[in-house]
């Protein structure tokens, strides 16, 4: 027997949403053993191309000692259905809803006695993503995920009985890297996520500004404070063990635009500045070491912030940012006169095959105009043998790959002082 539960109601409030739920029963055969019901957790990781559900953990630790020799990838089946949280208009498209069976590649007991079902996943593999992209909105949204678990063979117990789980209940989505960032809302209403290092003392602050697909869609009432950390590793990279070692511990803040930064950089700049001020007041921040980095829309906004707040940042890393005329606006988004006045140390990154924001009139041009700026220009965006779209050069920064004369970009950032 199987049971499906949408994560929308349960997941929205995180782990606490399951409090007070009456769990279904589980039947154990050969010995009349009775146990409580089973909840399962969706285990996710944010890959370079976006977050995917990589495993399912069944909370079986309290059911007795399962014989691991009876547990195989064929013991359970996993079905996944993903649908948009926003109604899709006729003729519109969302990439990617799905309704399919997930391939279980391995099954094991973890150190707690819970069953972990590893699922097939990887860059470019359909049916694992937690986000969908709505074409007309130009937005990533969190998909409503419904997972159905079915047991196909009994499990042997070490005491000699067998166990067949008849019902399951879906719990939360667990992504430890994302979950390490707390939820916040600024005084003016802009949402943001914040990671703070476990050690005290004055630490630098890294401001990450997302791309256009990670903003809100307020006409649909959609403002989730989630996609900024789930669509790519831009902010997460700076919270990794390697980055934290290089920066000797750093706060990482990721605001979410109420639309997209390019819509009105002049309006968004003071709202972002307000968030920086809030973090400085509430955390022990080294104000001589505040850094800004961003991709695409956020690359533009990173440059914009250094034109408006010329003495705030110790370094800036605009990735595939826009400065040239955009869409129907014939004027440059950031005029040369403003670029030429930037005094913040700046390292620009892009890929030559970017056909979304061509590097010539944008990254390369900005590099030519910004005094003493540095630039890394890749031919393609390839990581771990997988080629991504040329626009996705933020992947390299999230992996600390750009280097000049042997100095990598995170090390360069960490050495800059205001």
Image: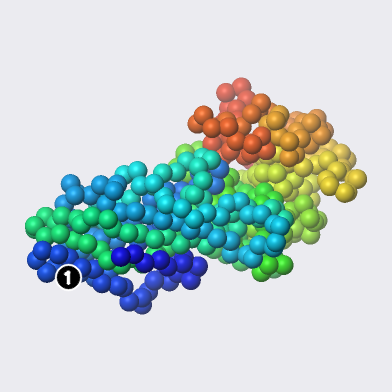
Q: Is residue 180 visible?
A: no
Rendering quarter of residue 357: top right
- In the rendered structure, the answer to whether residue 296 lies left or right of residue 23 reads right
Q: Residue at x 40, y 66 (%)?
A: 4
- In the rendered structure, the answer to whether residue 42 lies left or right of residue 223 reads left
Label 1, residues with CA under 10 Å away: few <14, some 14-19, many ≥20: some
Residue at the disc numbered 1: 34
Q: Which corner quadrant holds the C terminus?
A: top right
- Image color mode: rainbow
Most foreground residue, 203 or 109: 109
Residue 253 x/y as whole percent: 59, 54
Q: Which corner quadrant holds the N terminus?
A: bottom left
Please determine whether, in this image, residue 271 is positioned above or below residue 288: below
Q: How many marks?
A: 1
Rendering quarter of residue 63: bottom left
Q: Is residue 382 visible?
A: yes
Please determine whether, in this image, residue 27 is positioned above or below residue 120: below
Residue 273 x/y as whole percent: 70, 57
Q: Under tag 1, what secondary structure?
A: strand
Residue 52 x/y as whole percent: 48, 49
């Amino acid at each position: 027997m199987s049971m499906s539960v949408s994560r929308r109601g349960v997941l929205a409030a995180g782990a606490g949403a399951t409090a007070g739920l009456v769990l279904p029963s589980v039947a154990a055969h050969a010995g009349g053993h009775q146990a409580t019901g089973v909840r399962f957790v969706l285990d996710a990781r944010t890959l370079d191309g976006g977050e995917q559900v990589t495993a399912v953990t069944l909370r079986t630790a309290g059911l007795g000692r399962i014989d691991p020799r009876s547990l195989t990838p064929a013991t359970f089946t996993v079905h996944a259905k993903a649908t948009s949280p926003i109604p899709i208009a006729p003729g519109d498209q969302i990439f990617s809803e799905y309704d399919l069976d997930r391939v279980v590649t391995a099954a094991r007991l973890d150190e707690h006695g819970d069953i972990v079902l590893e699922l097939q996943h990887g860059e470019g593999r359909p049916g694992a993503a937690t986000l969908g992209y709505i074409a007309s909105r130009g937005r990533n949204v969190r998909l409503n995920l419904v997972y159905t678990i079915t047991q196909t063979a009994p499990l042997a117990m070490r005491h000699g009985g067998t166990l067949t789980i008849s019902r399951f209940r879906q719990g939360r989505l667990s992504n430890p890297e994302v979950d390490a960032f707390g939820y916040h809302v600024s005084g003016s209403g802009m949402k943001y996520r914040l990671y703070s290092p476990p050690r005290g003392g004055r630490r630098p602050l890294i401001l990450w500004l997302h791309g256009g697909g990670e903003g809100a869609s307020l006409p649909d009432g959609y403002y989730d404070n989630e996609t900024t950390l789930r669509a790519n590793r831009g902010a997460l990279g700076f919270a990794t063990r390697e980055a934290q070692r290089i920066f000797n511990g750093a706060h990482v803040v990721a605001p979410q635009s109420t639309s997209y930064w390019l819509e009105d950089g002049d309006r968004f700049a003071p709202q972002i500045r307000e968030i920086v001020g809030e973090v400085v007041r509430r955390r022990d921040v080294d104000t001589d070491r505040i850094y800004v980095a961003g991709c695409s829309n956020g690359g533009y906004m990173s440059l914009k912030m250094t034109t408006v707040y010329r003495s705030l940042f110790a370094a800036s890393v605009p990735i595939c940012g826009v400065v040239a005329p955009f869409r129907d606006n014939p004027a440059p988004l950031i005029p040369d006169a403003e670029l030429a006045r930037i005094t913040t140390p700046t390292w620009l990154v892009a890929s030559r095959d970017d056909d979304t924001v061509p590097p010539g009139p944008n990254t390369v041009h900005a590099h030519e105009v910004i005094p003493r700026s540095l630039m890394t220009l890749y031919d393609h965006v390839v990581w771990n043998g997988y080629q991504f779209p040329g626009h996705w050069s933020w992947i390299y920064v999230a992996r600390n790959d750009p280097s000049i004369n042997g100095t990598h970009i995170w090390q360069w950032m960490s050495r800059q002082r205001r």
